[in-house]
Amino acid sequence: MTIRFDGRVAIVTGAGNGLGRAHALELARRGAKVVVNDFGGSRDGQGTSFDAAQKVVDEIRAAGGTAIANGANVCDFEQVLAMVEQAKAAFGRVDVLLNNAGILRDKTFSKMEIADFKAVVDVHLMGSVNCTKAVWEIMREQNYGRILMTTSASGLFGNFGQSNYGAAKMALVGLMHMLTIEGKKNNIRVNTIAPMAATRMTEDVLPAAMLDAIKPEQVTPAALFLVSEDAPSKTTLSAGGGAFSACRIEDTAAVYLGPKECTVDGVAEHFAQITDWDSARAYDDSNAQVHTLIQAAIAGMKA
């Protein structure tokens, strides 16, 4: 067991069941002191209960680990601040944050109430923002932090009936990009995982045969690697059933259209060339992408 978390303090949200529970148990097994957060609501965010979080804490303690339970609603910033204070009071610091809490309210966009759209965005996006903001200055001051966002294939690639969920999940990738840049000088590394696992979130979304093959414990290795001492930053890993892949946002090579071709018709005529993905590459930040466009325009004008 070469990757350890001895001396580290980790907060895992939505850790009463499924993926969060698996992450919390393995963090503790590898030496971390864990704050097991779970609001205790149903899959759509209704109701509250402290039982789920406490059961995971009991499991960790029974195995010889160290953990405390917390029932904060990640949508409530004041509750999140109190959770972080609880972690500091108990353990003195916060080193790792796994933003895992989430809900589902699936419907087609035409049938979805705006309240259901907002509720899902509030938990996935703003819940992650709240928790990250609450630990950010602590991590800056100690010059160490590891933060994991949880995205989804629905956000990265789209899925029918999940406009609220997909929008929130893709937003977390953008948040990772920004925080990677801002956290670099203080050794704060921020990554994202796109999990596929049999949980109460997916029990009626995926076929039964598939659910049997994708256990939450098979996602946890990627999650813990992304919050480990030697973790990368600005990395999105997909994980499920023991299979792992990496996903990134790319941009094709810029195609310059001169004054006569810089029209709607010109874009249509050159669309295949513009969308030539064989020329695609990623960028460290937005400035590099903008610079590439400017250089292509300057080169085109000089030609």
Image (cartoon, helix red, strand yellow):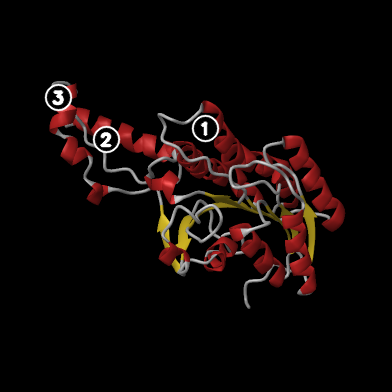
Q: CA distance from mark 3 to mark 1?
A: 37 Å
Q: Residue furthest bottom?
A: 1
Rendering coords of residue 110 (x, y %): 40, 29
Q: Earlier in the sequence, mark 2 or mark 3?
A: 3
Q: Which mark is residue 8?
A: none
The amino acid type found where label 1 is placed reads Phe
Residue underneath mark 1: 117
Residue at point 67%, 37% (across, down): 75
Q: Quadrant of the C terminus?
A: top left
**Which structural element holds mark 2?**
helix
Q: CA distance from mark 2 to mark 3?
A: 20 Å
Q: Quadrant of the N terminus?
A: bottom right
Rendering coords of residue 132 (x, y %): 66, 44
Residue underneath mark 3: 265
Rendering coords of residue 136 (x, y %): 69, 44
Report the front residue among 194 and 39.
39
| Mark whose residue sits in front, 2 or 1 | 1
Left or right? Give the position of 149 relative to 33. left
Residue underneath mark 2: 296
Left or right? Give the position of 65 relative to 123. right
Residue at point 62%, 64% (across, down): 22
The amino acid type found where label 3 is placed reads Asp
Q: Earlier in the sequence, mark 2 or mark 1?
A: 1
